[in-house]
Image: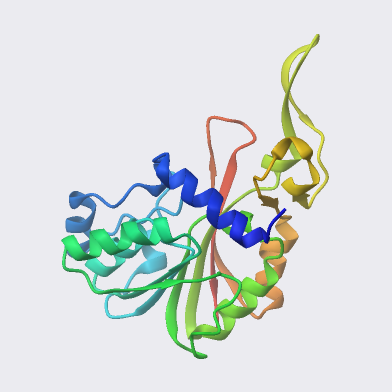
Amino acid sequence: MKDIFKQVEHNINSLVEKQVWWASCASAEQMQNARDGKIELKLGINKTVPSEWIAGIKGKDVLCLAGAGGLQAPILACAGANVTVIDISEKMLEKDRVIARDNDLNIRIEHGNMCDLSRFSDNSFDYIINPASLLYVPDVMPVFKECYRVLRQGGSLILAAPNPIAYVCDYVEDKKGAYYKAVNRMPYRSTDYADQGDWIEYGHTMEAYIGGQISCGFVISGYVEEQMDDITELNFMTKADKI
């Protein structure tokens, strides 16, 4: 298999071409609401980021980490934040370029890997907003360490991710019927399974997600879960502060 991140970029670009729902741009209504102070920010799950987590974001420096696609960055820019977006997928970034151009929004757009934020100086941002994307990196620690470095004191990392149960269980159909069965050990790597082809995805443990942020110096100050229709699709959001 080629370099994993080149493969991830290829996979995401292909999904954008197929018009997956999570690559839909912000609507005119969502952007106007943000201008009016009503920020409805989603990170790849149905629940919105709690309003108290992003209160006072106007005028703040915000990094949308692996956050292209024309959704979070335009909403935050309309809310008055100074927004930078970095993403591995050029097709996702193009959606931000178009919506920024068409709505006269000032968004700094960077093509890059979320594991390497070396282009940004220490203490550059007040917020980092990370939609569900850590499932595309084999190790979350380089991401958390870089986030801690580029955040200012008092800054916050807000991220969304799938609970490990999504990877532990597979949908099984046999003579007993159809049901979910715990079959995979964590951490999960799609590259270990021939039937996954060139698809690359990683299932991380809660220890990696929560413990990883704490070990880097973050203090977890917010946690939200969302159960989807599929019983194994349990997503969560955390707010972690650099204090």
| Image coords of residue 178 (percent x, y) | 71, 16
Residue at image location 36% in from the left, 56% down from the top: 41
* Left or right: 239 in relation to 232: left
The answer to whether any part of residue 117 appears in the image is yes
Residue 141 location, quadrant: bottom right
Display coloring: rainbow
In the current view of this chain or complex, which residue is farthest to the top?
Answer: 175
Q: Position of residue 181 (x, y in %)?
A: 78, 28
Q: Is residue 1 left or right of residue 27?
A: right
The residue sitting at 30% across, 51% down in the picture is 25
* Residue at the far bottom in the pictured view: 122
Q: How many marks?
A: 0
Q: Is residue 13 left or right of residue 201?
A: left
> Can you say which quadrant of the picture contains the C terminus?
bottom right
Image quadrant of residue 100?
A: bottom left
**Relative to the observer, which residue lies in front, 210 or 113?**
113
Image position, residue 200 (x, y; %) = 66, 50
Residue 224, can we see it? no
Question: 80 or 214, which is in the foreground?
Answer: 80
Coordinates of residue 196 in the picture (x, y in percent): 70, 39
Left or right relative to 62: residue 139: right
Which residue is more in the foreground, 65 or 37?
65
Residue drawn 75% across and 48% down? Answer: 191
Image: 223 above or below 63 = above
| Relative vertical location of residue 28 with respect to residue 72 in this rendering, above or below | above
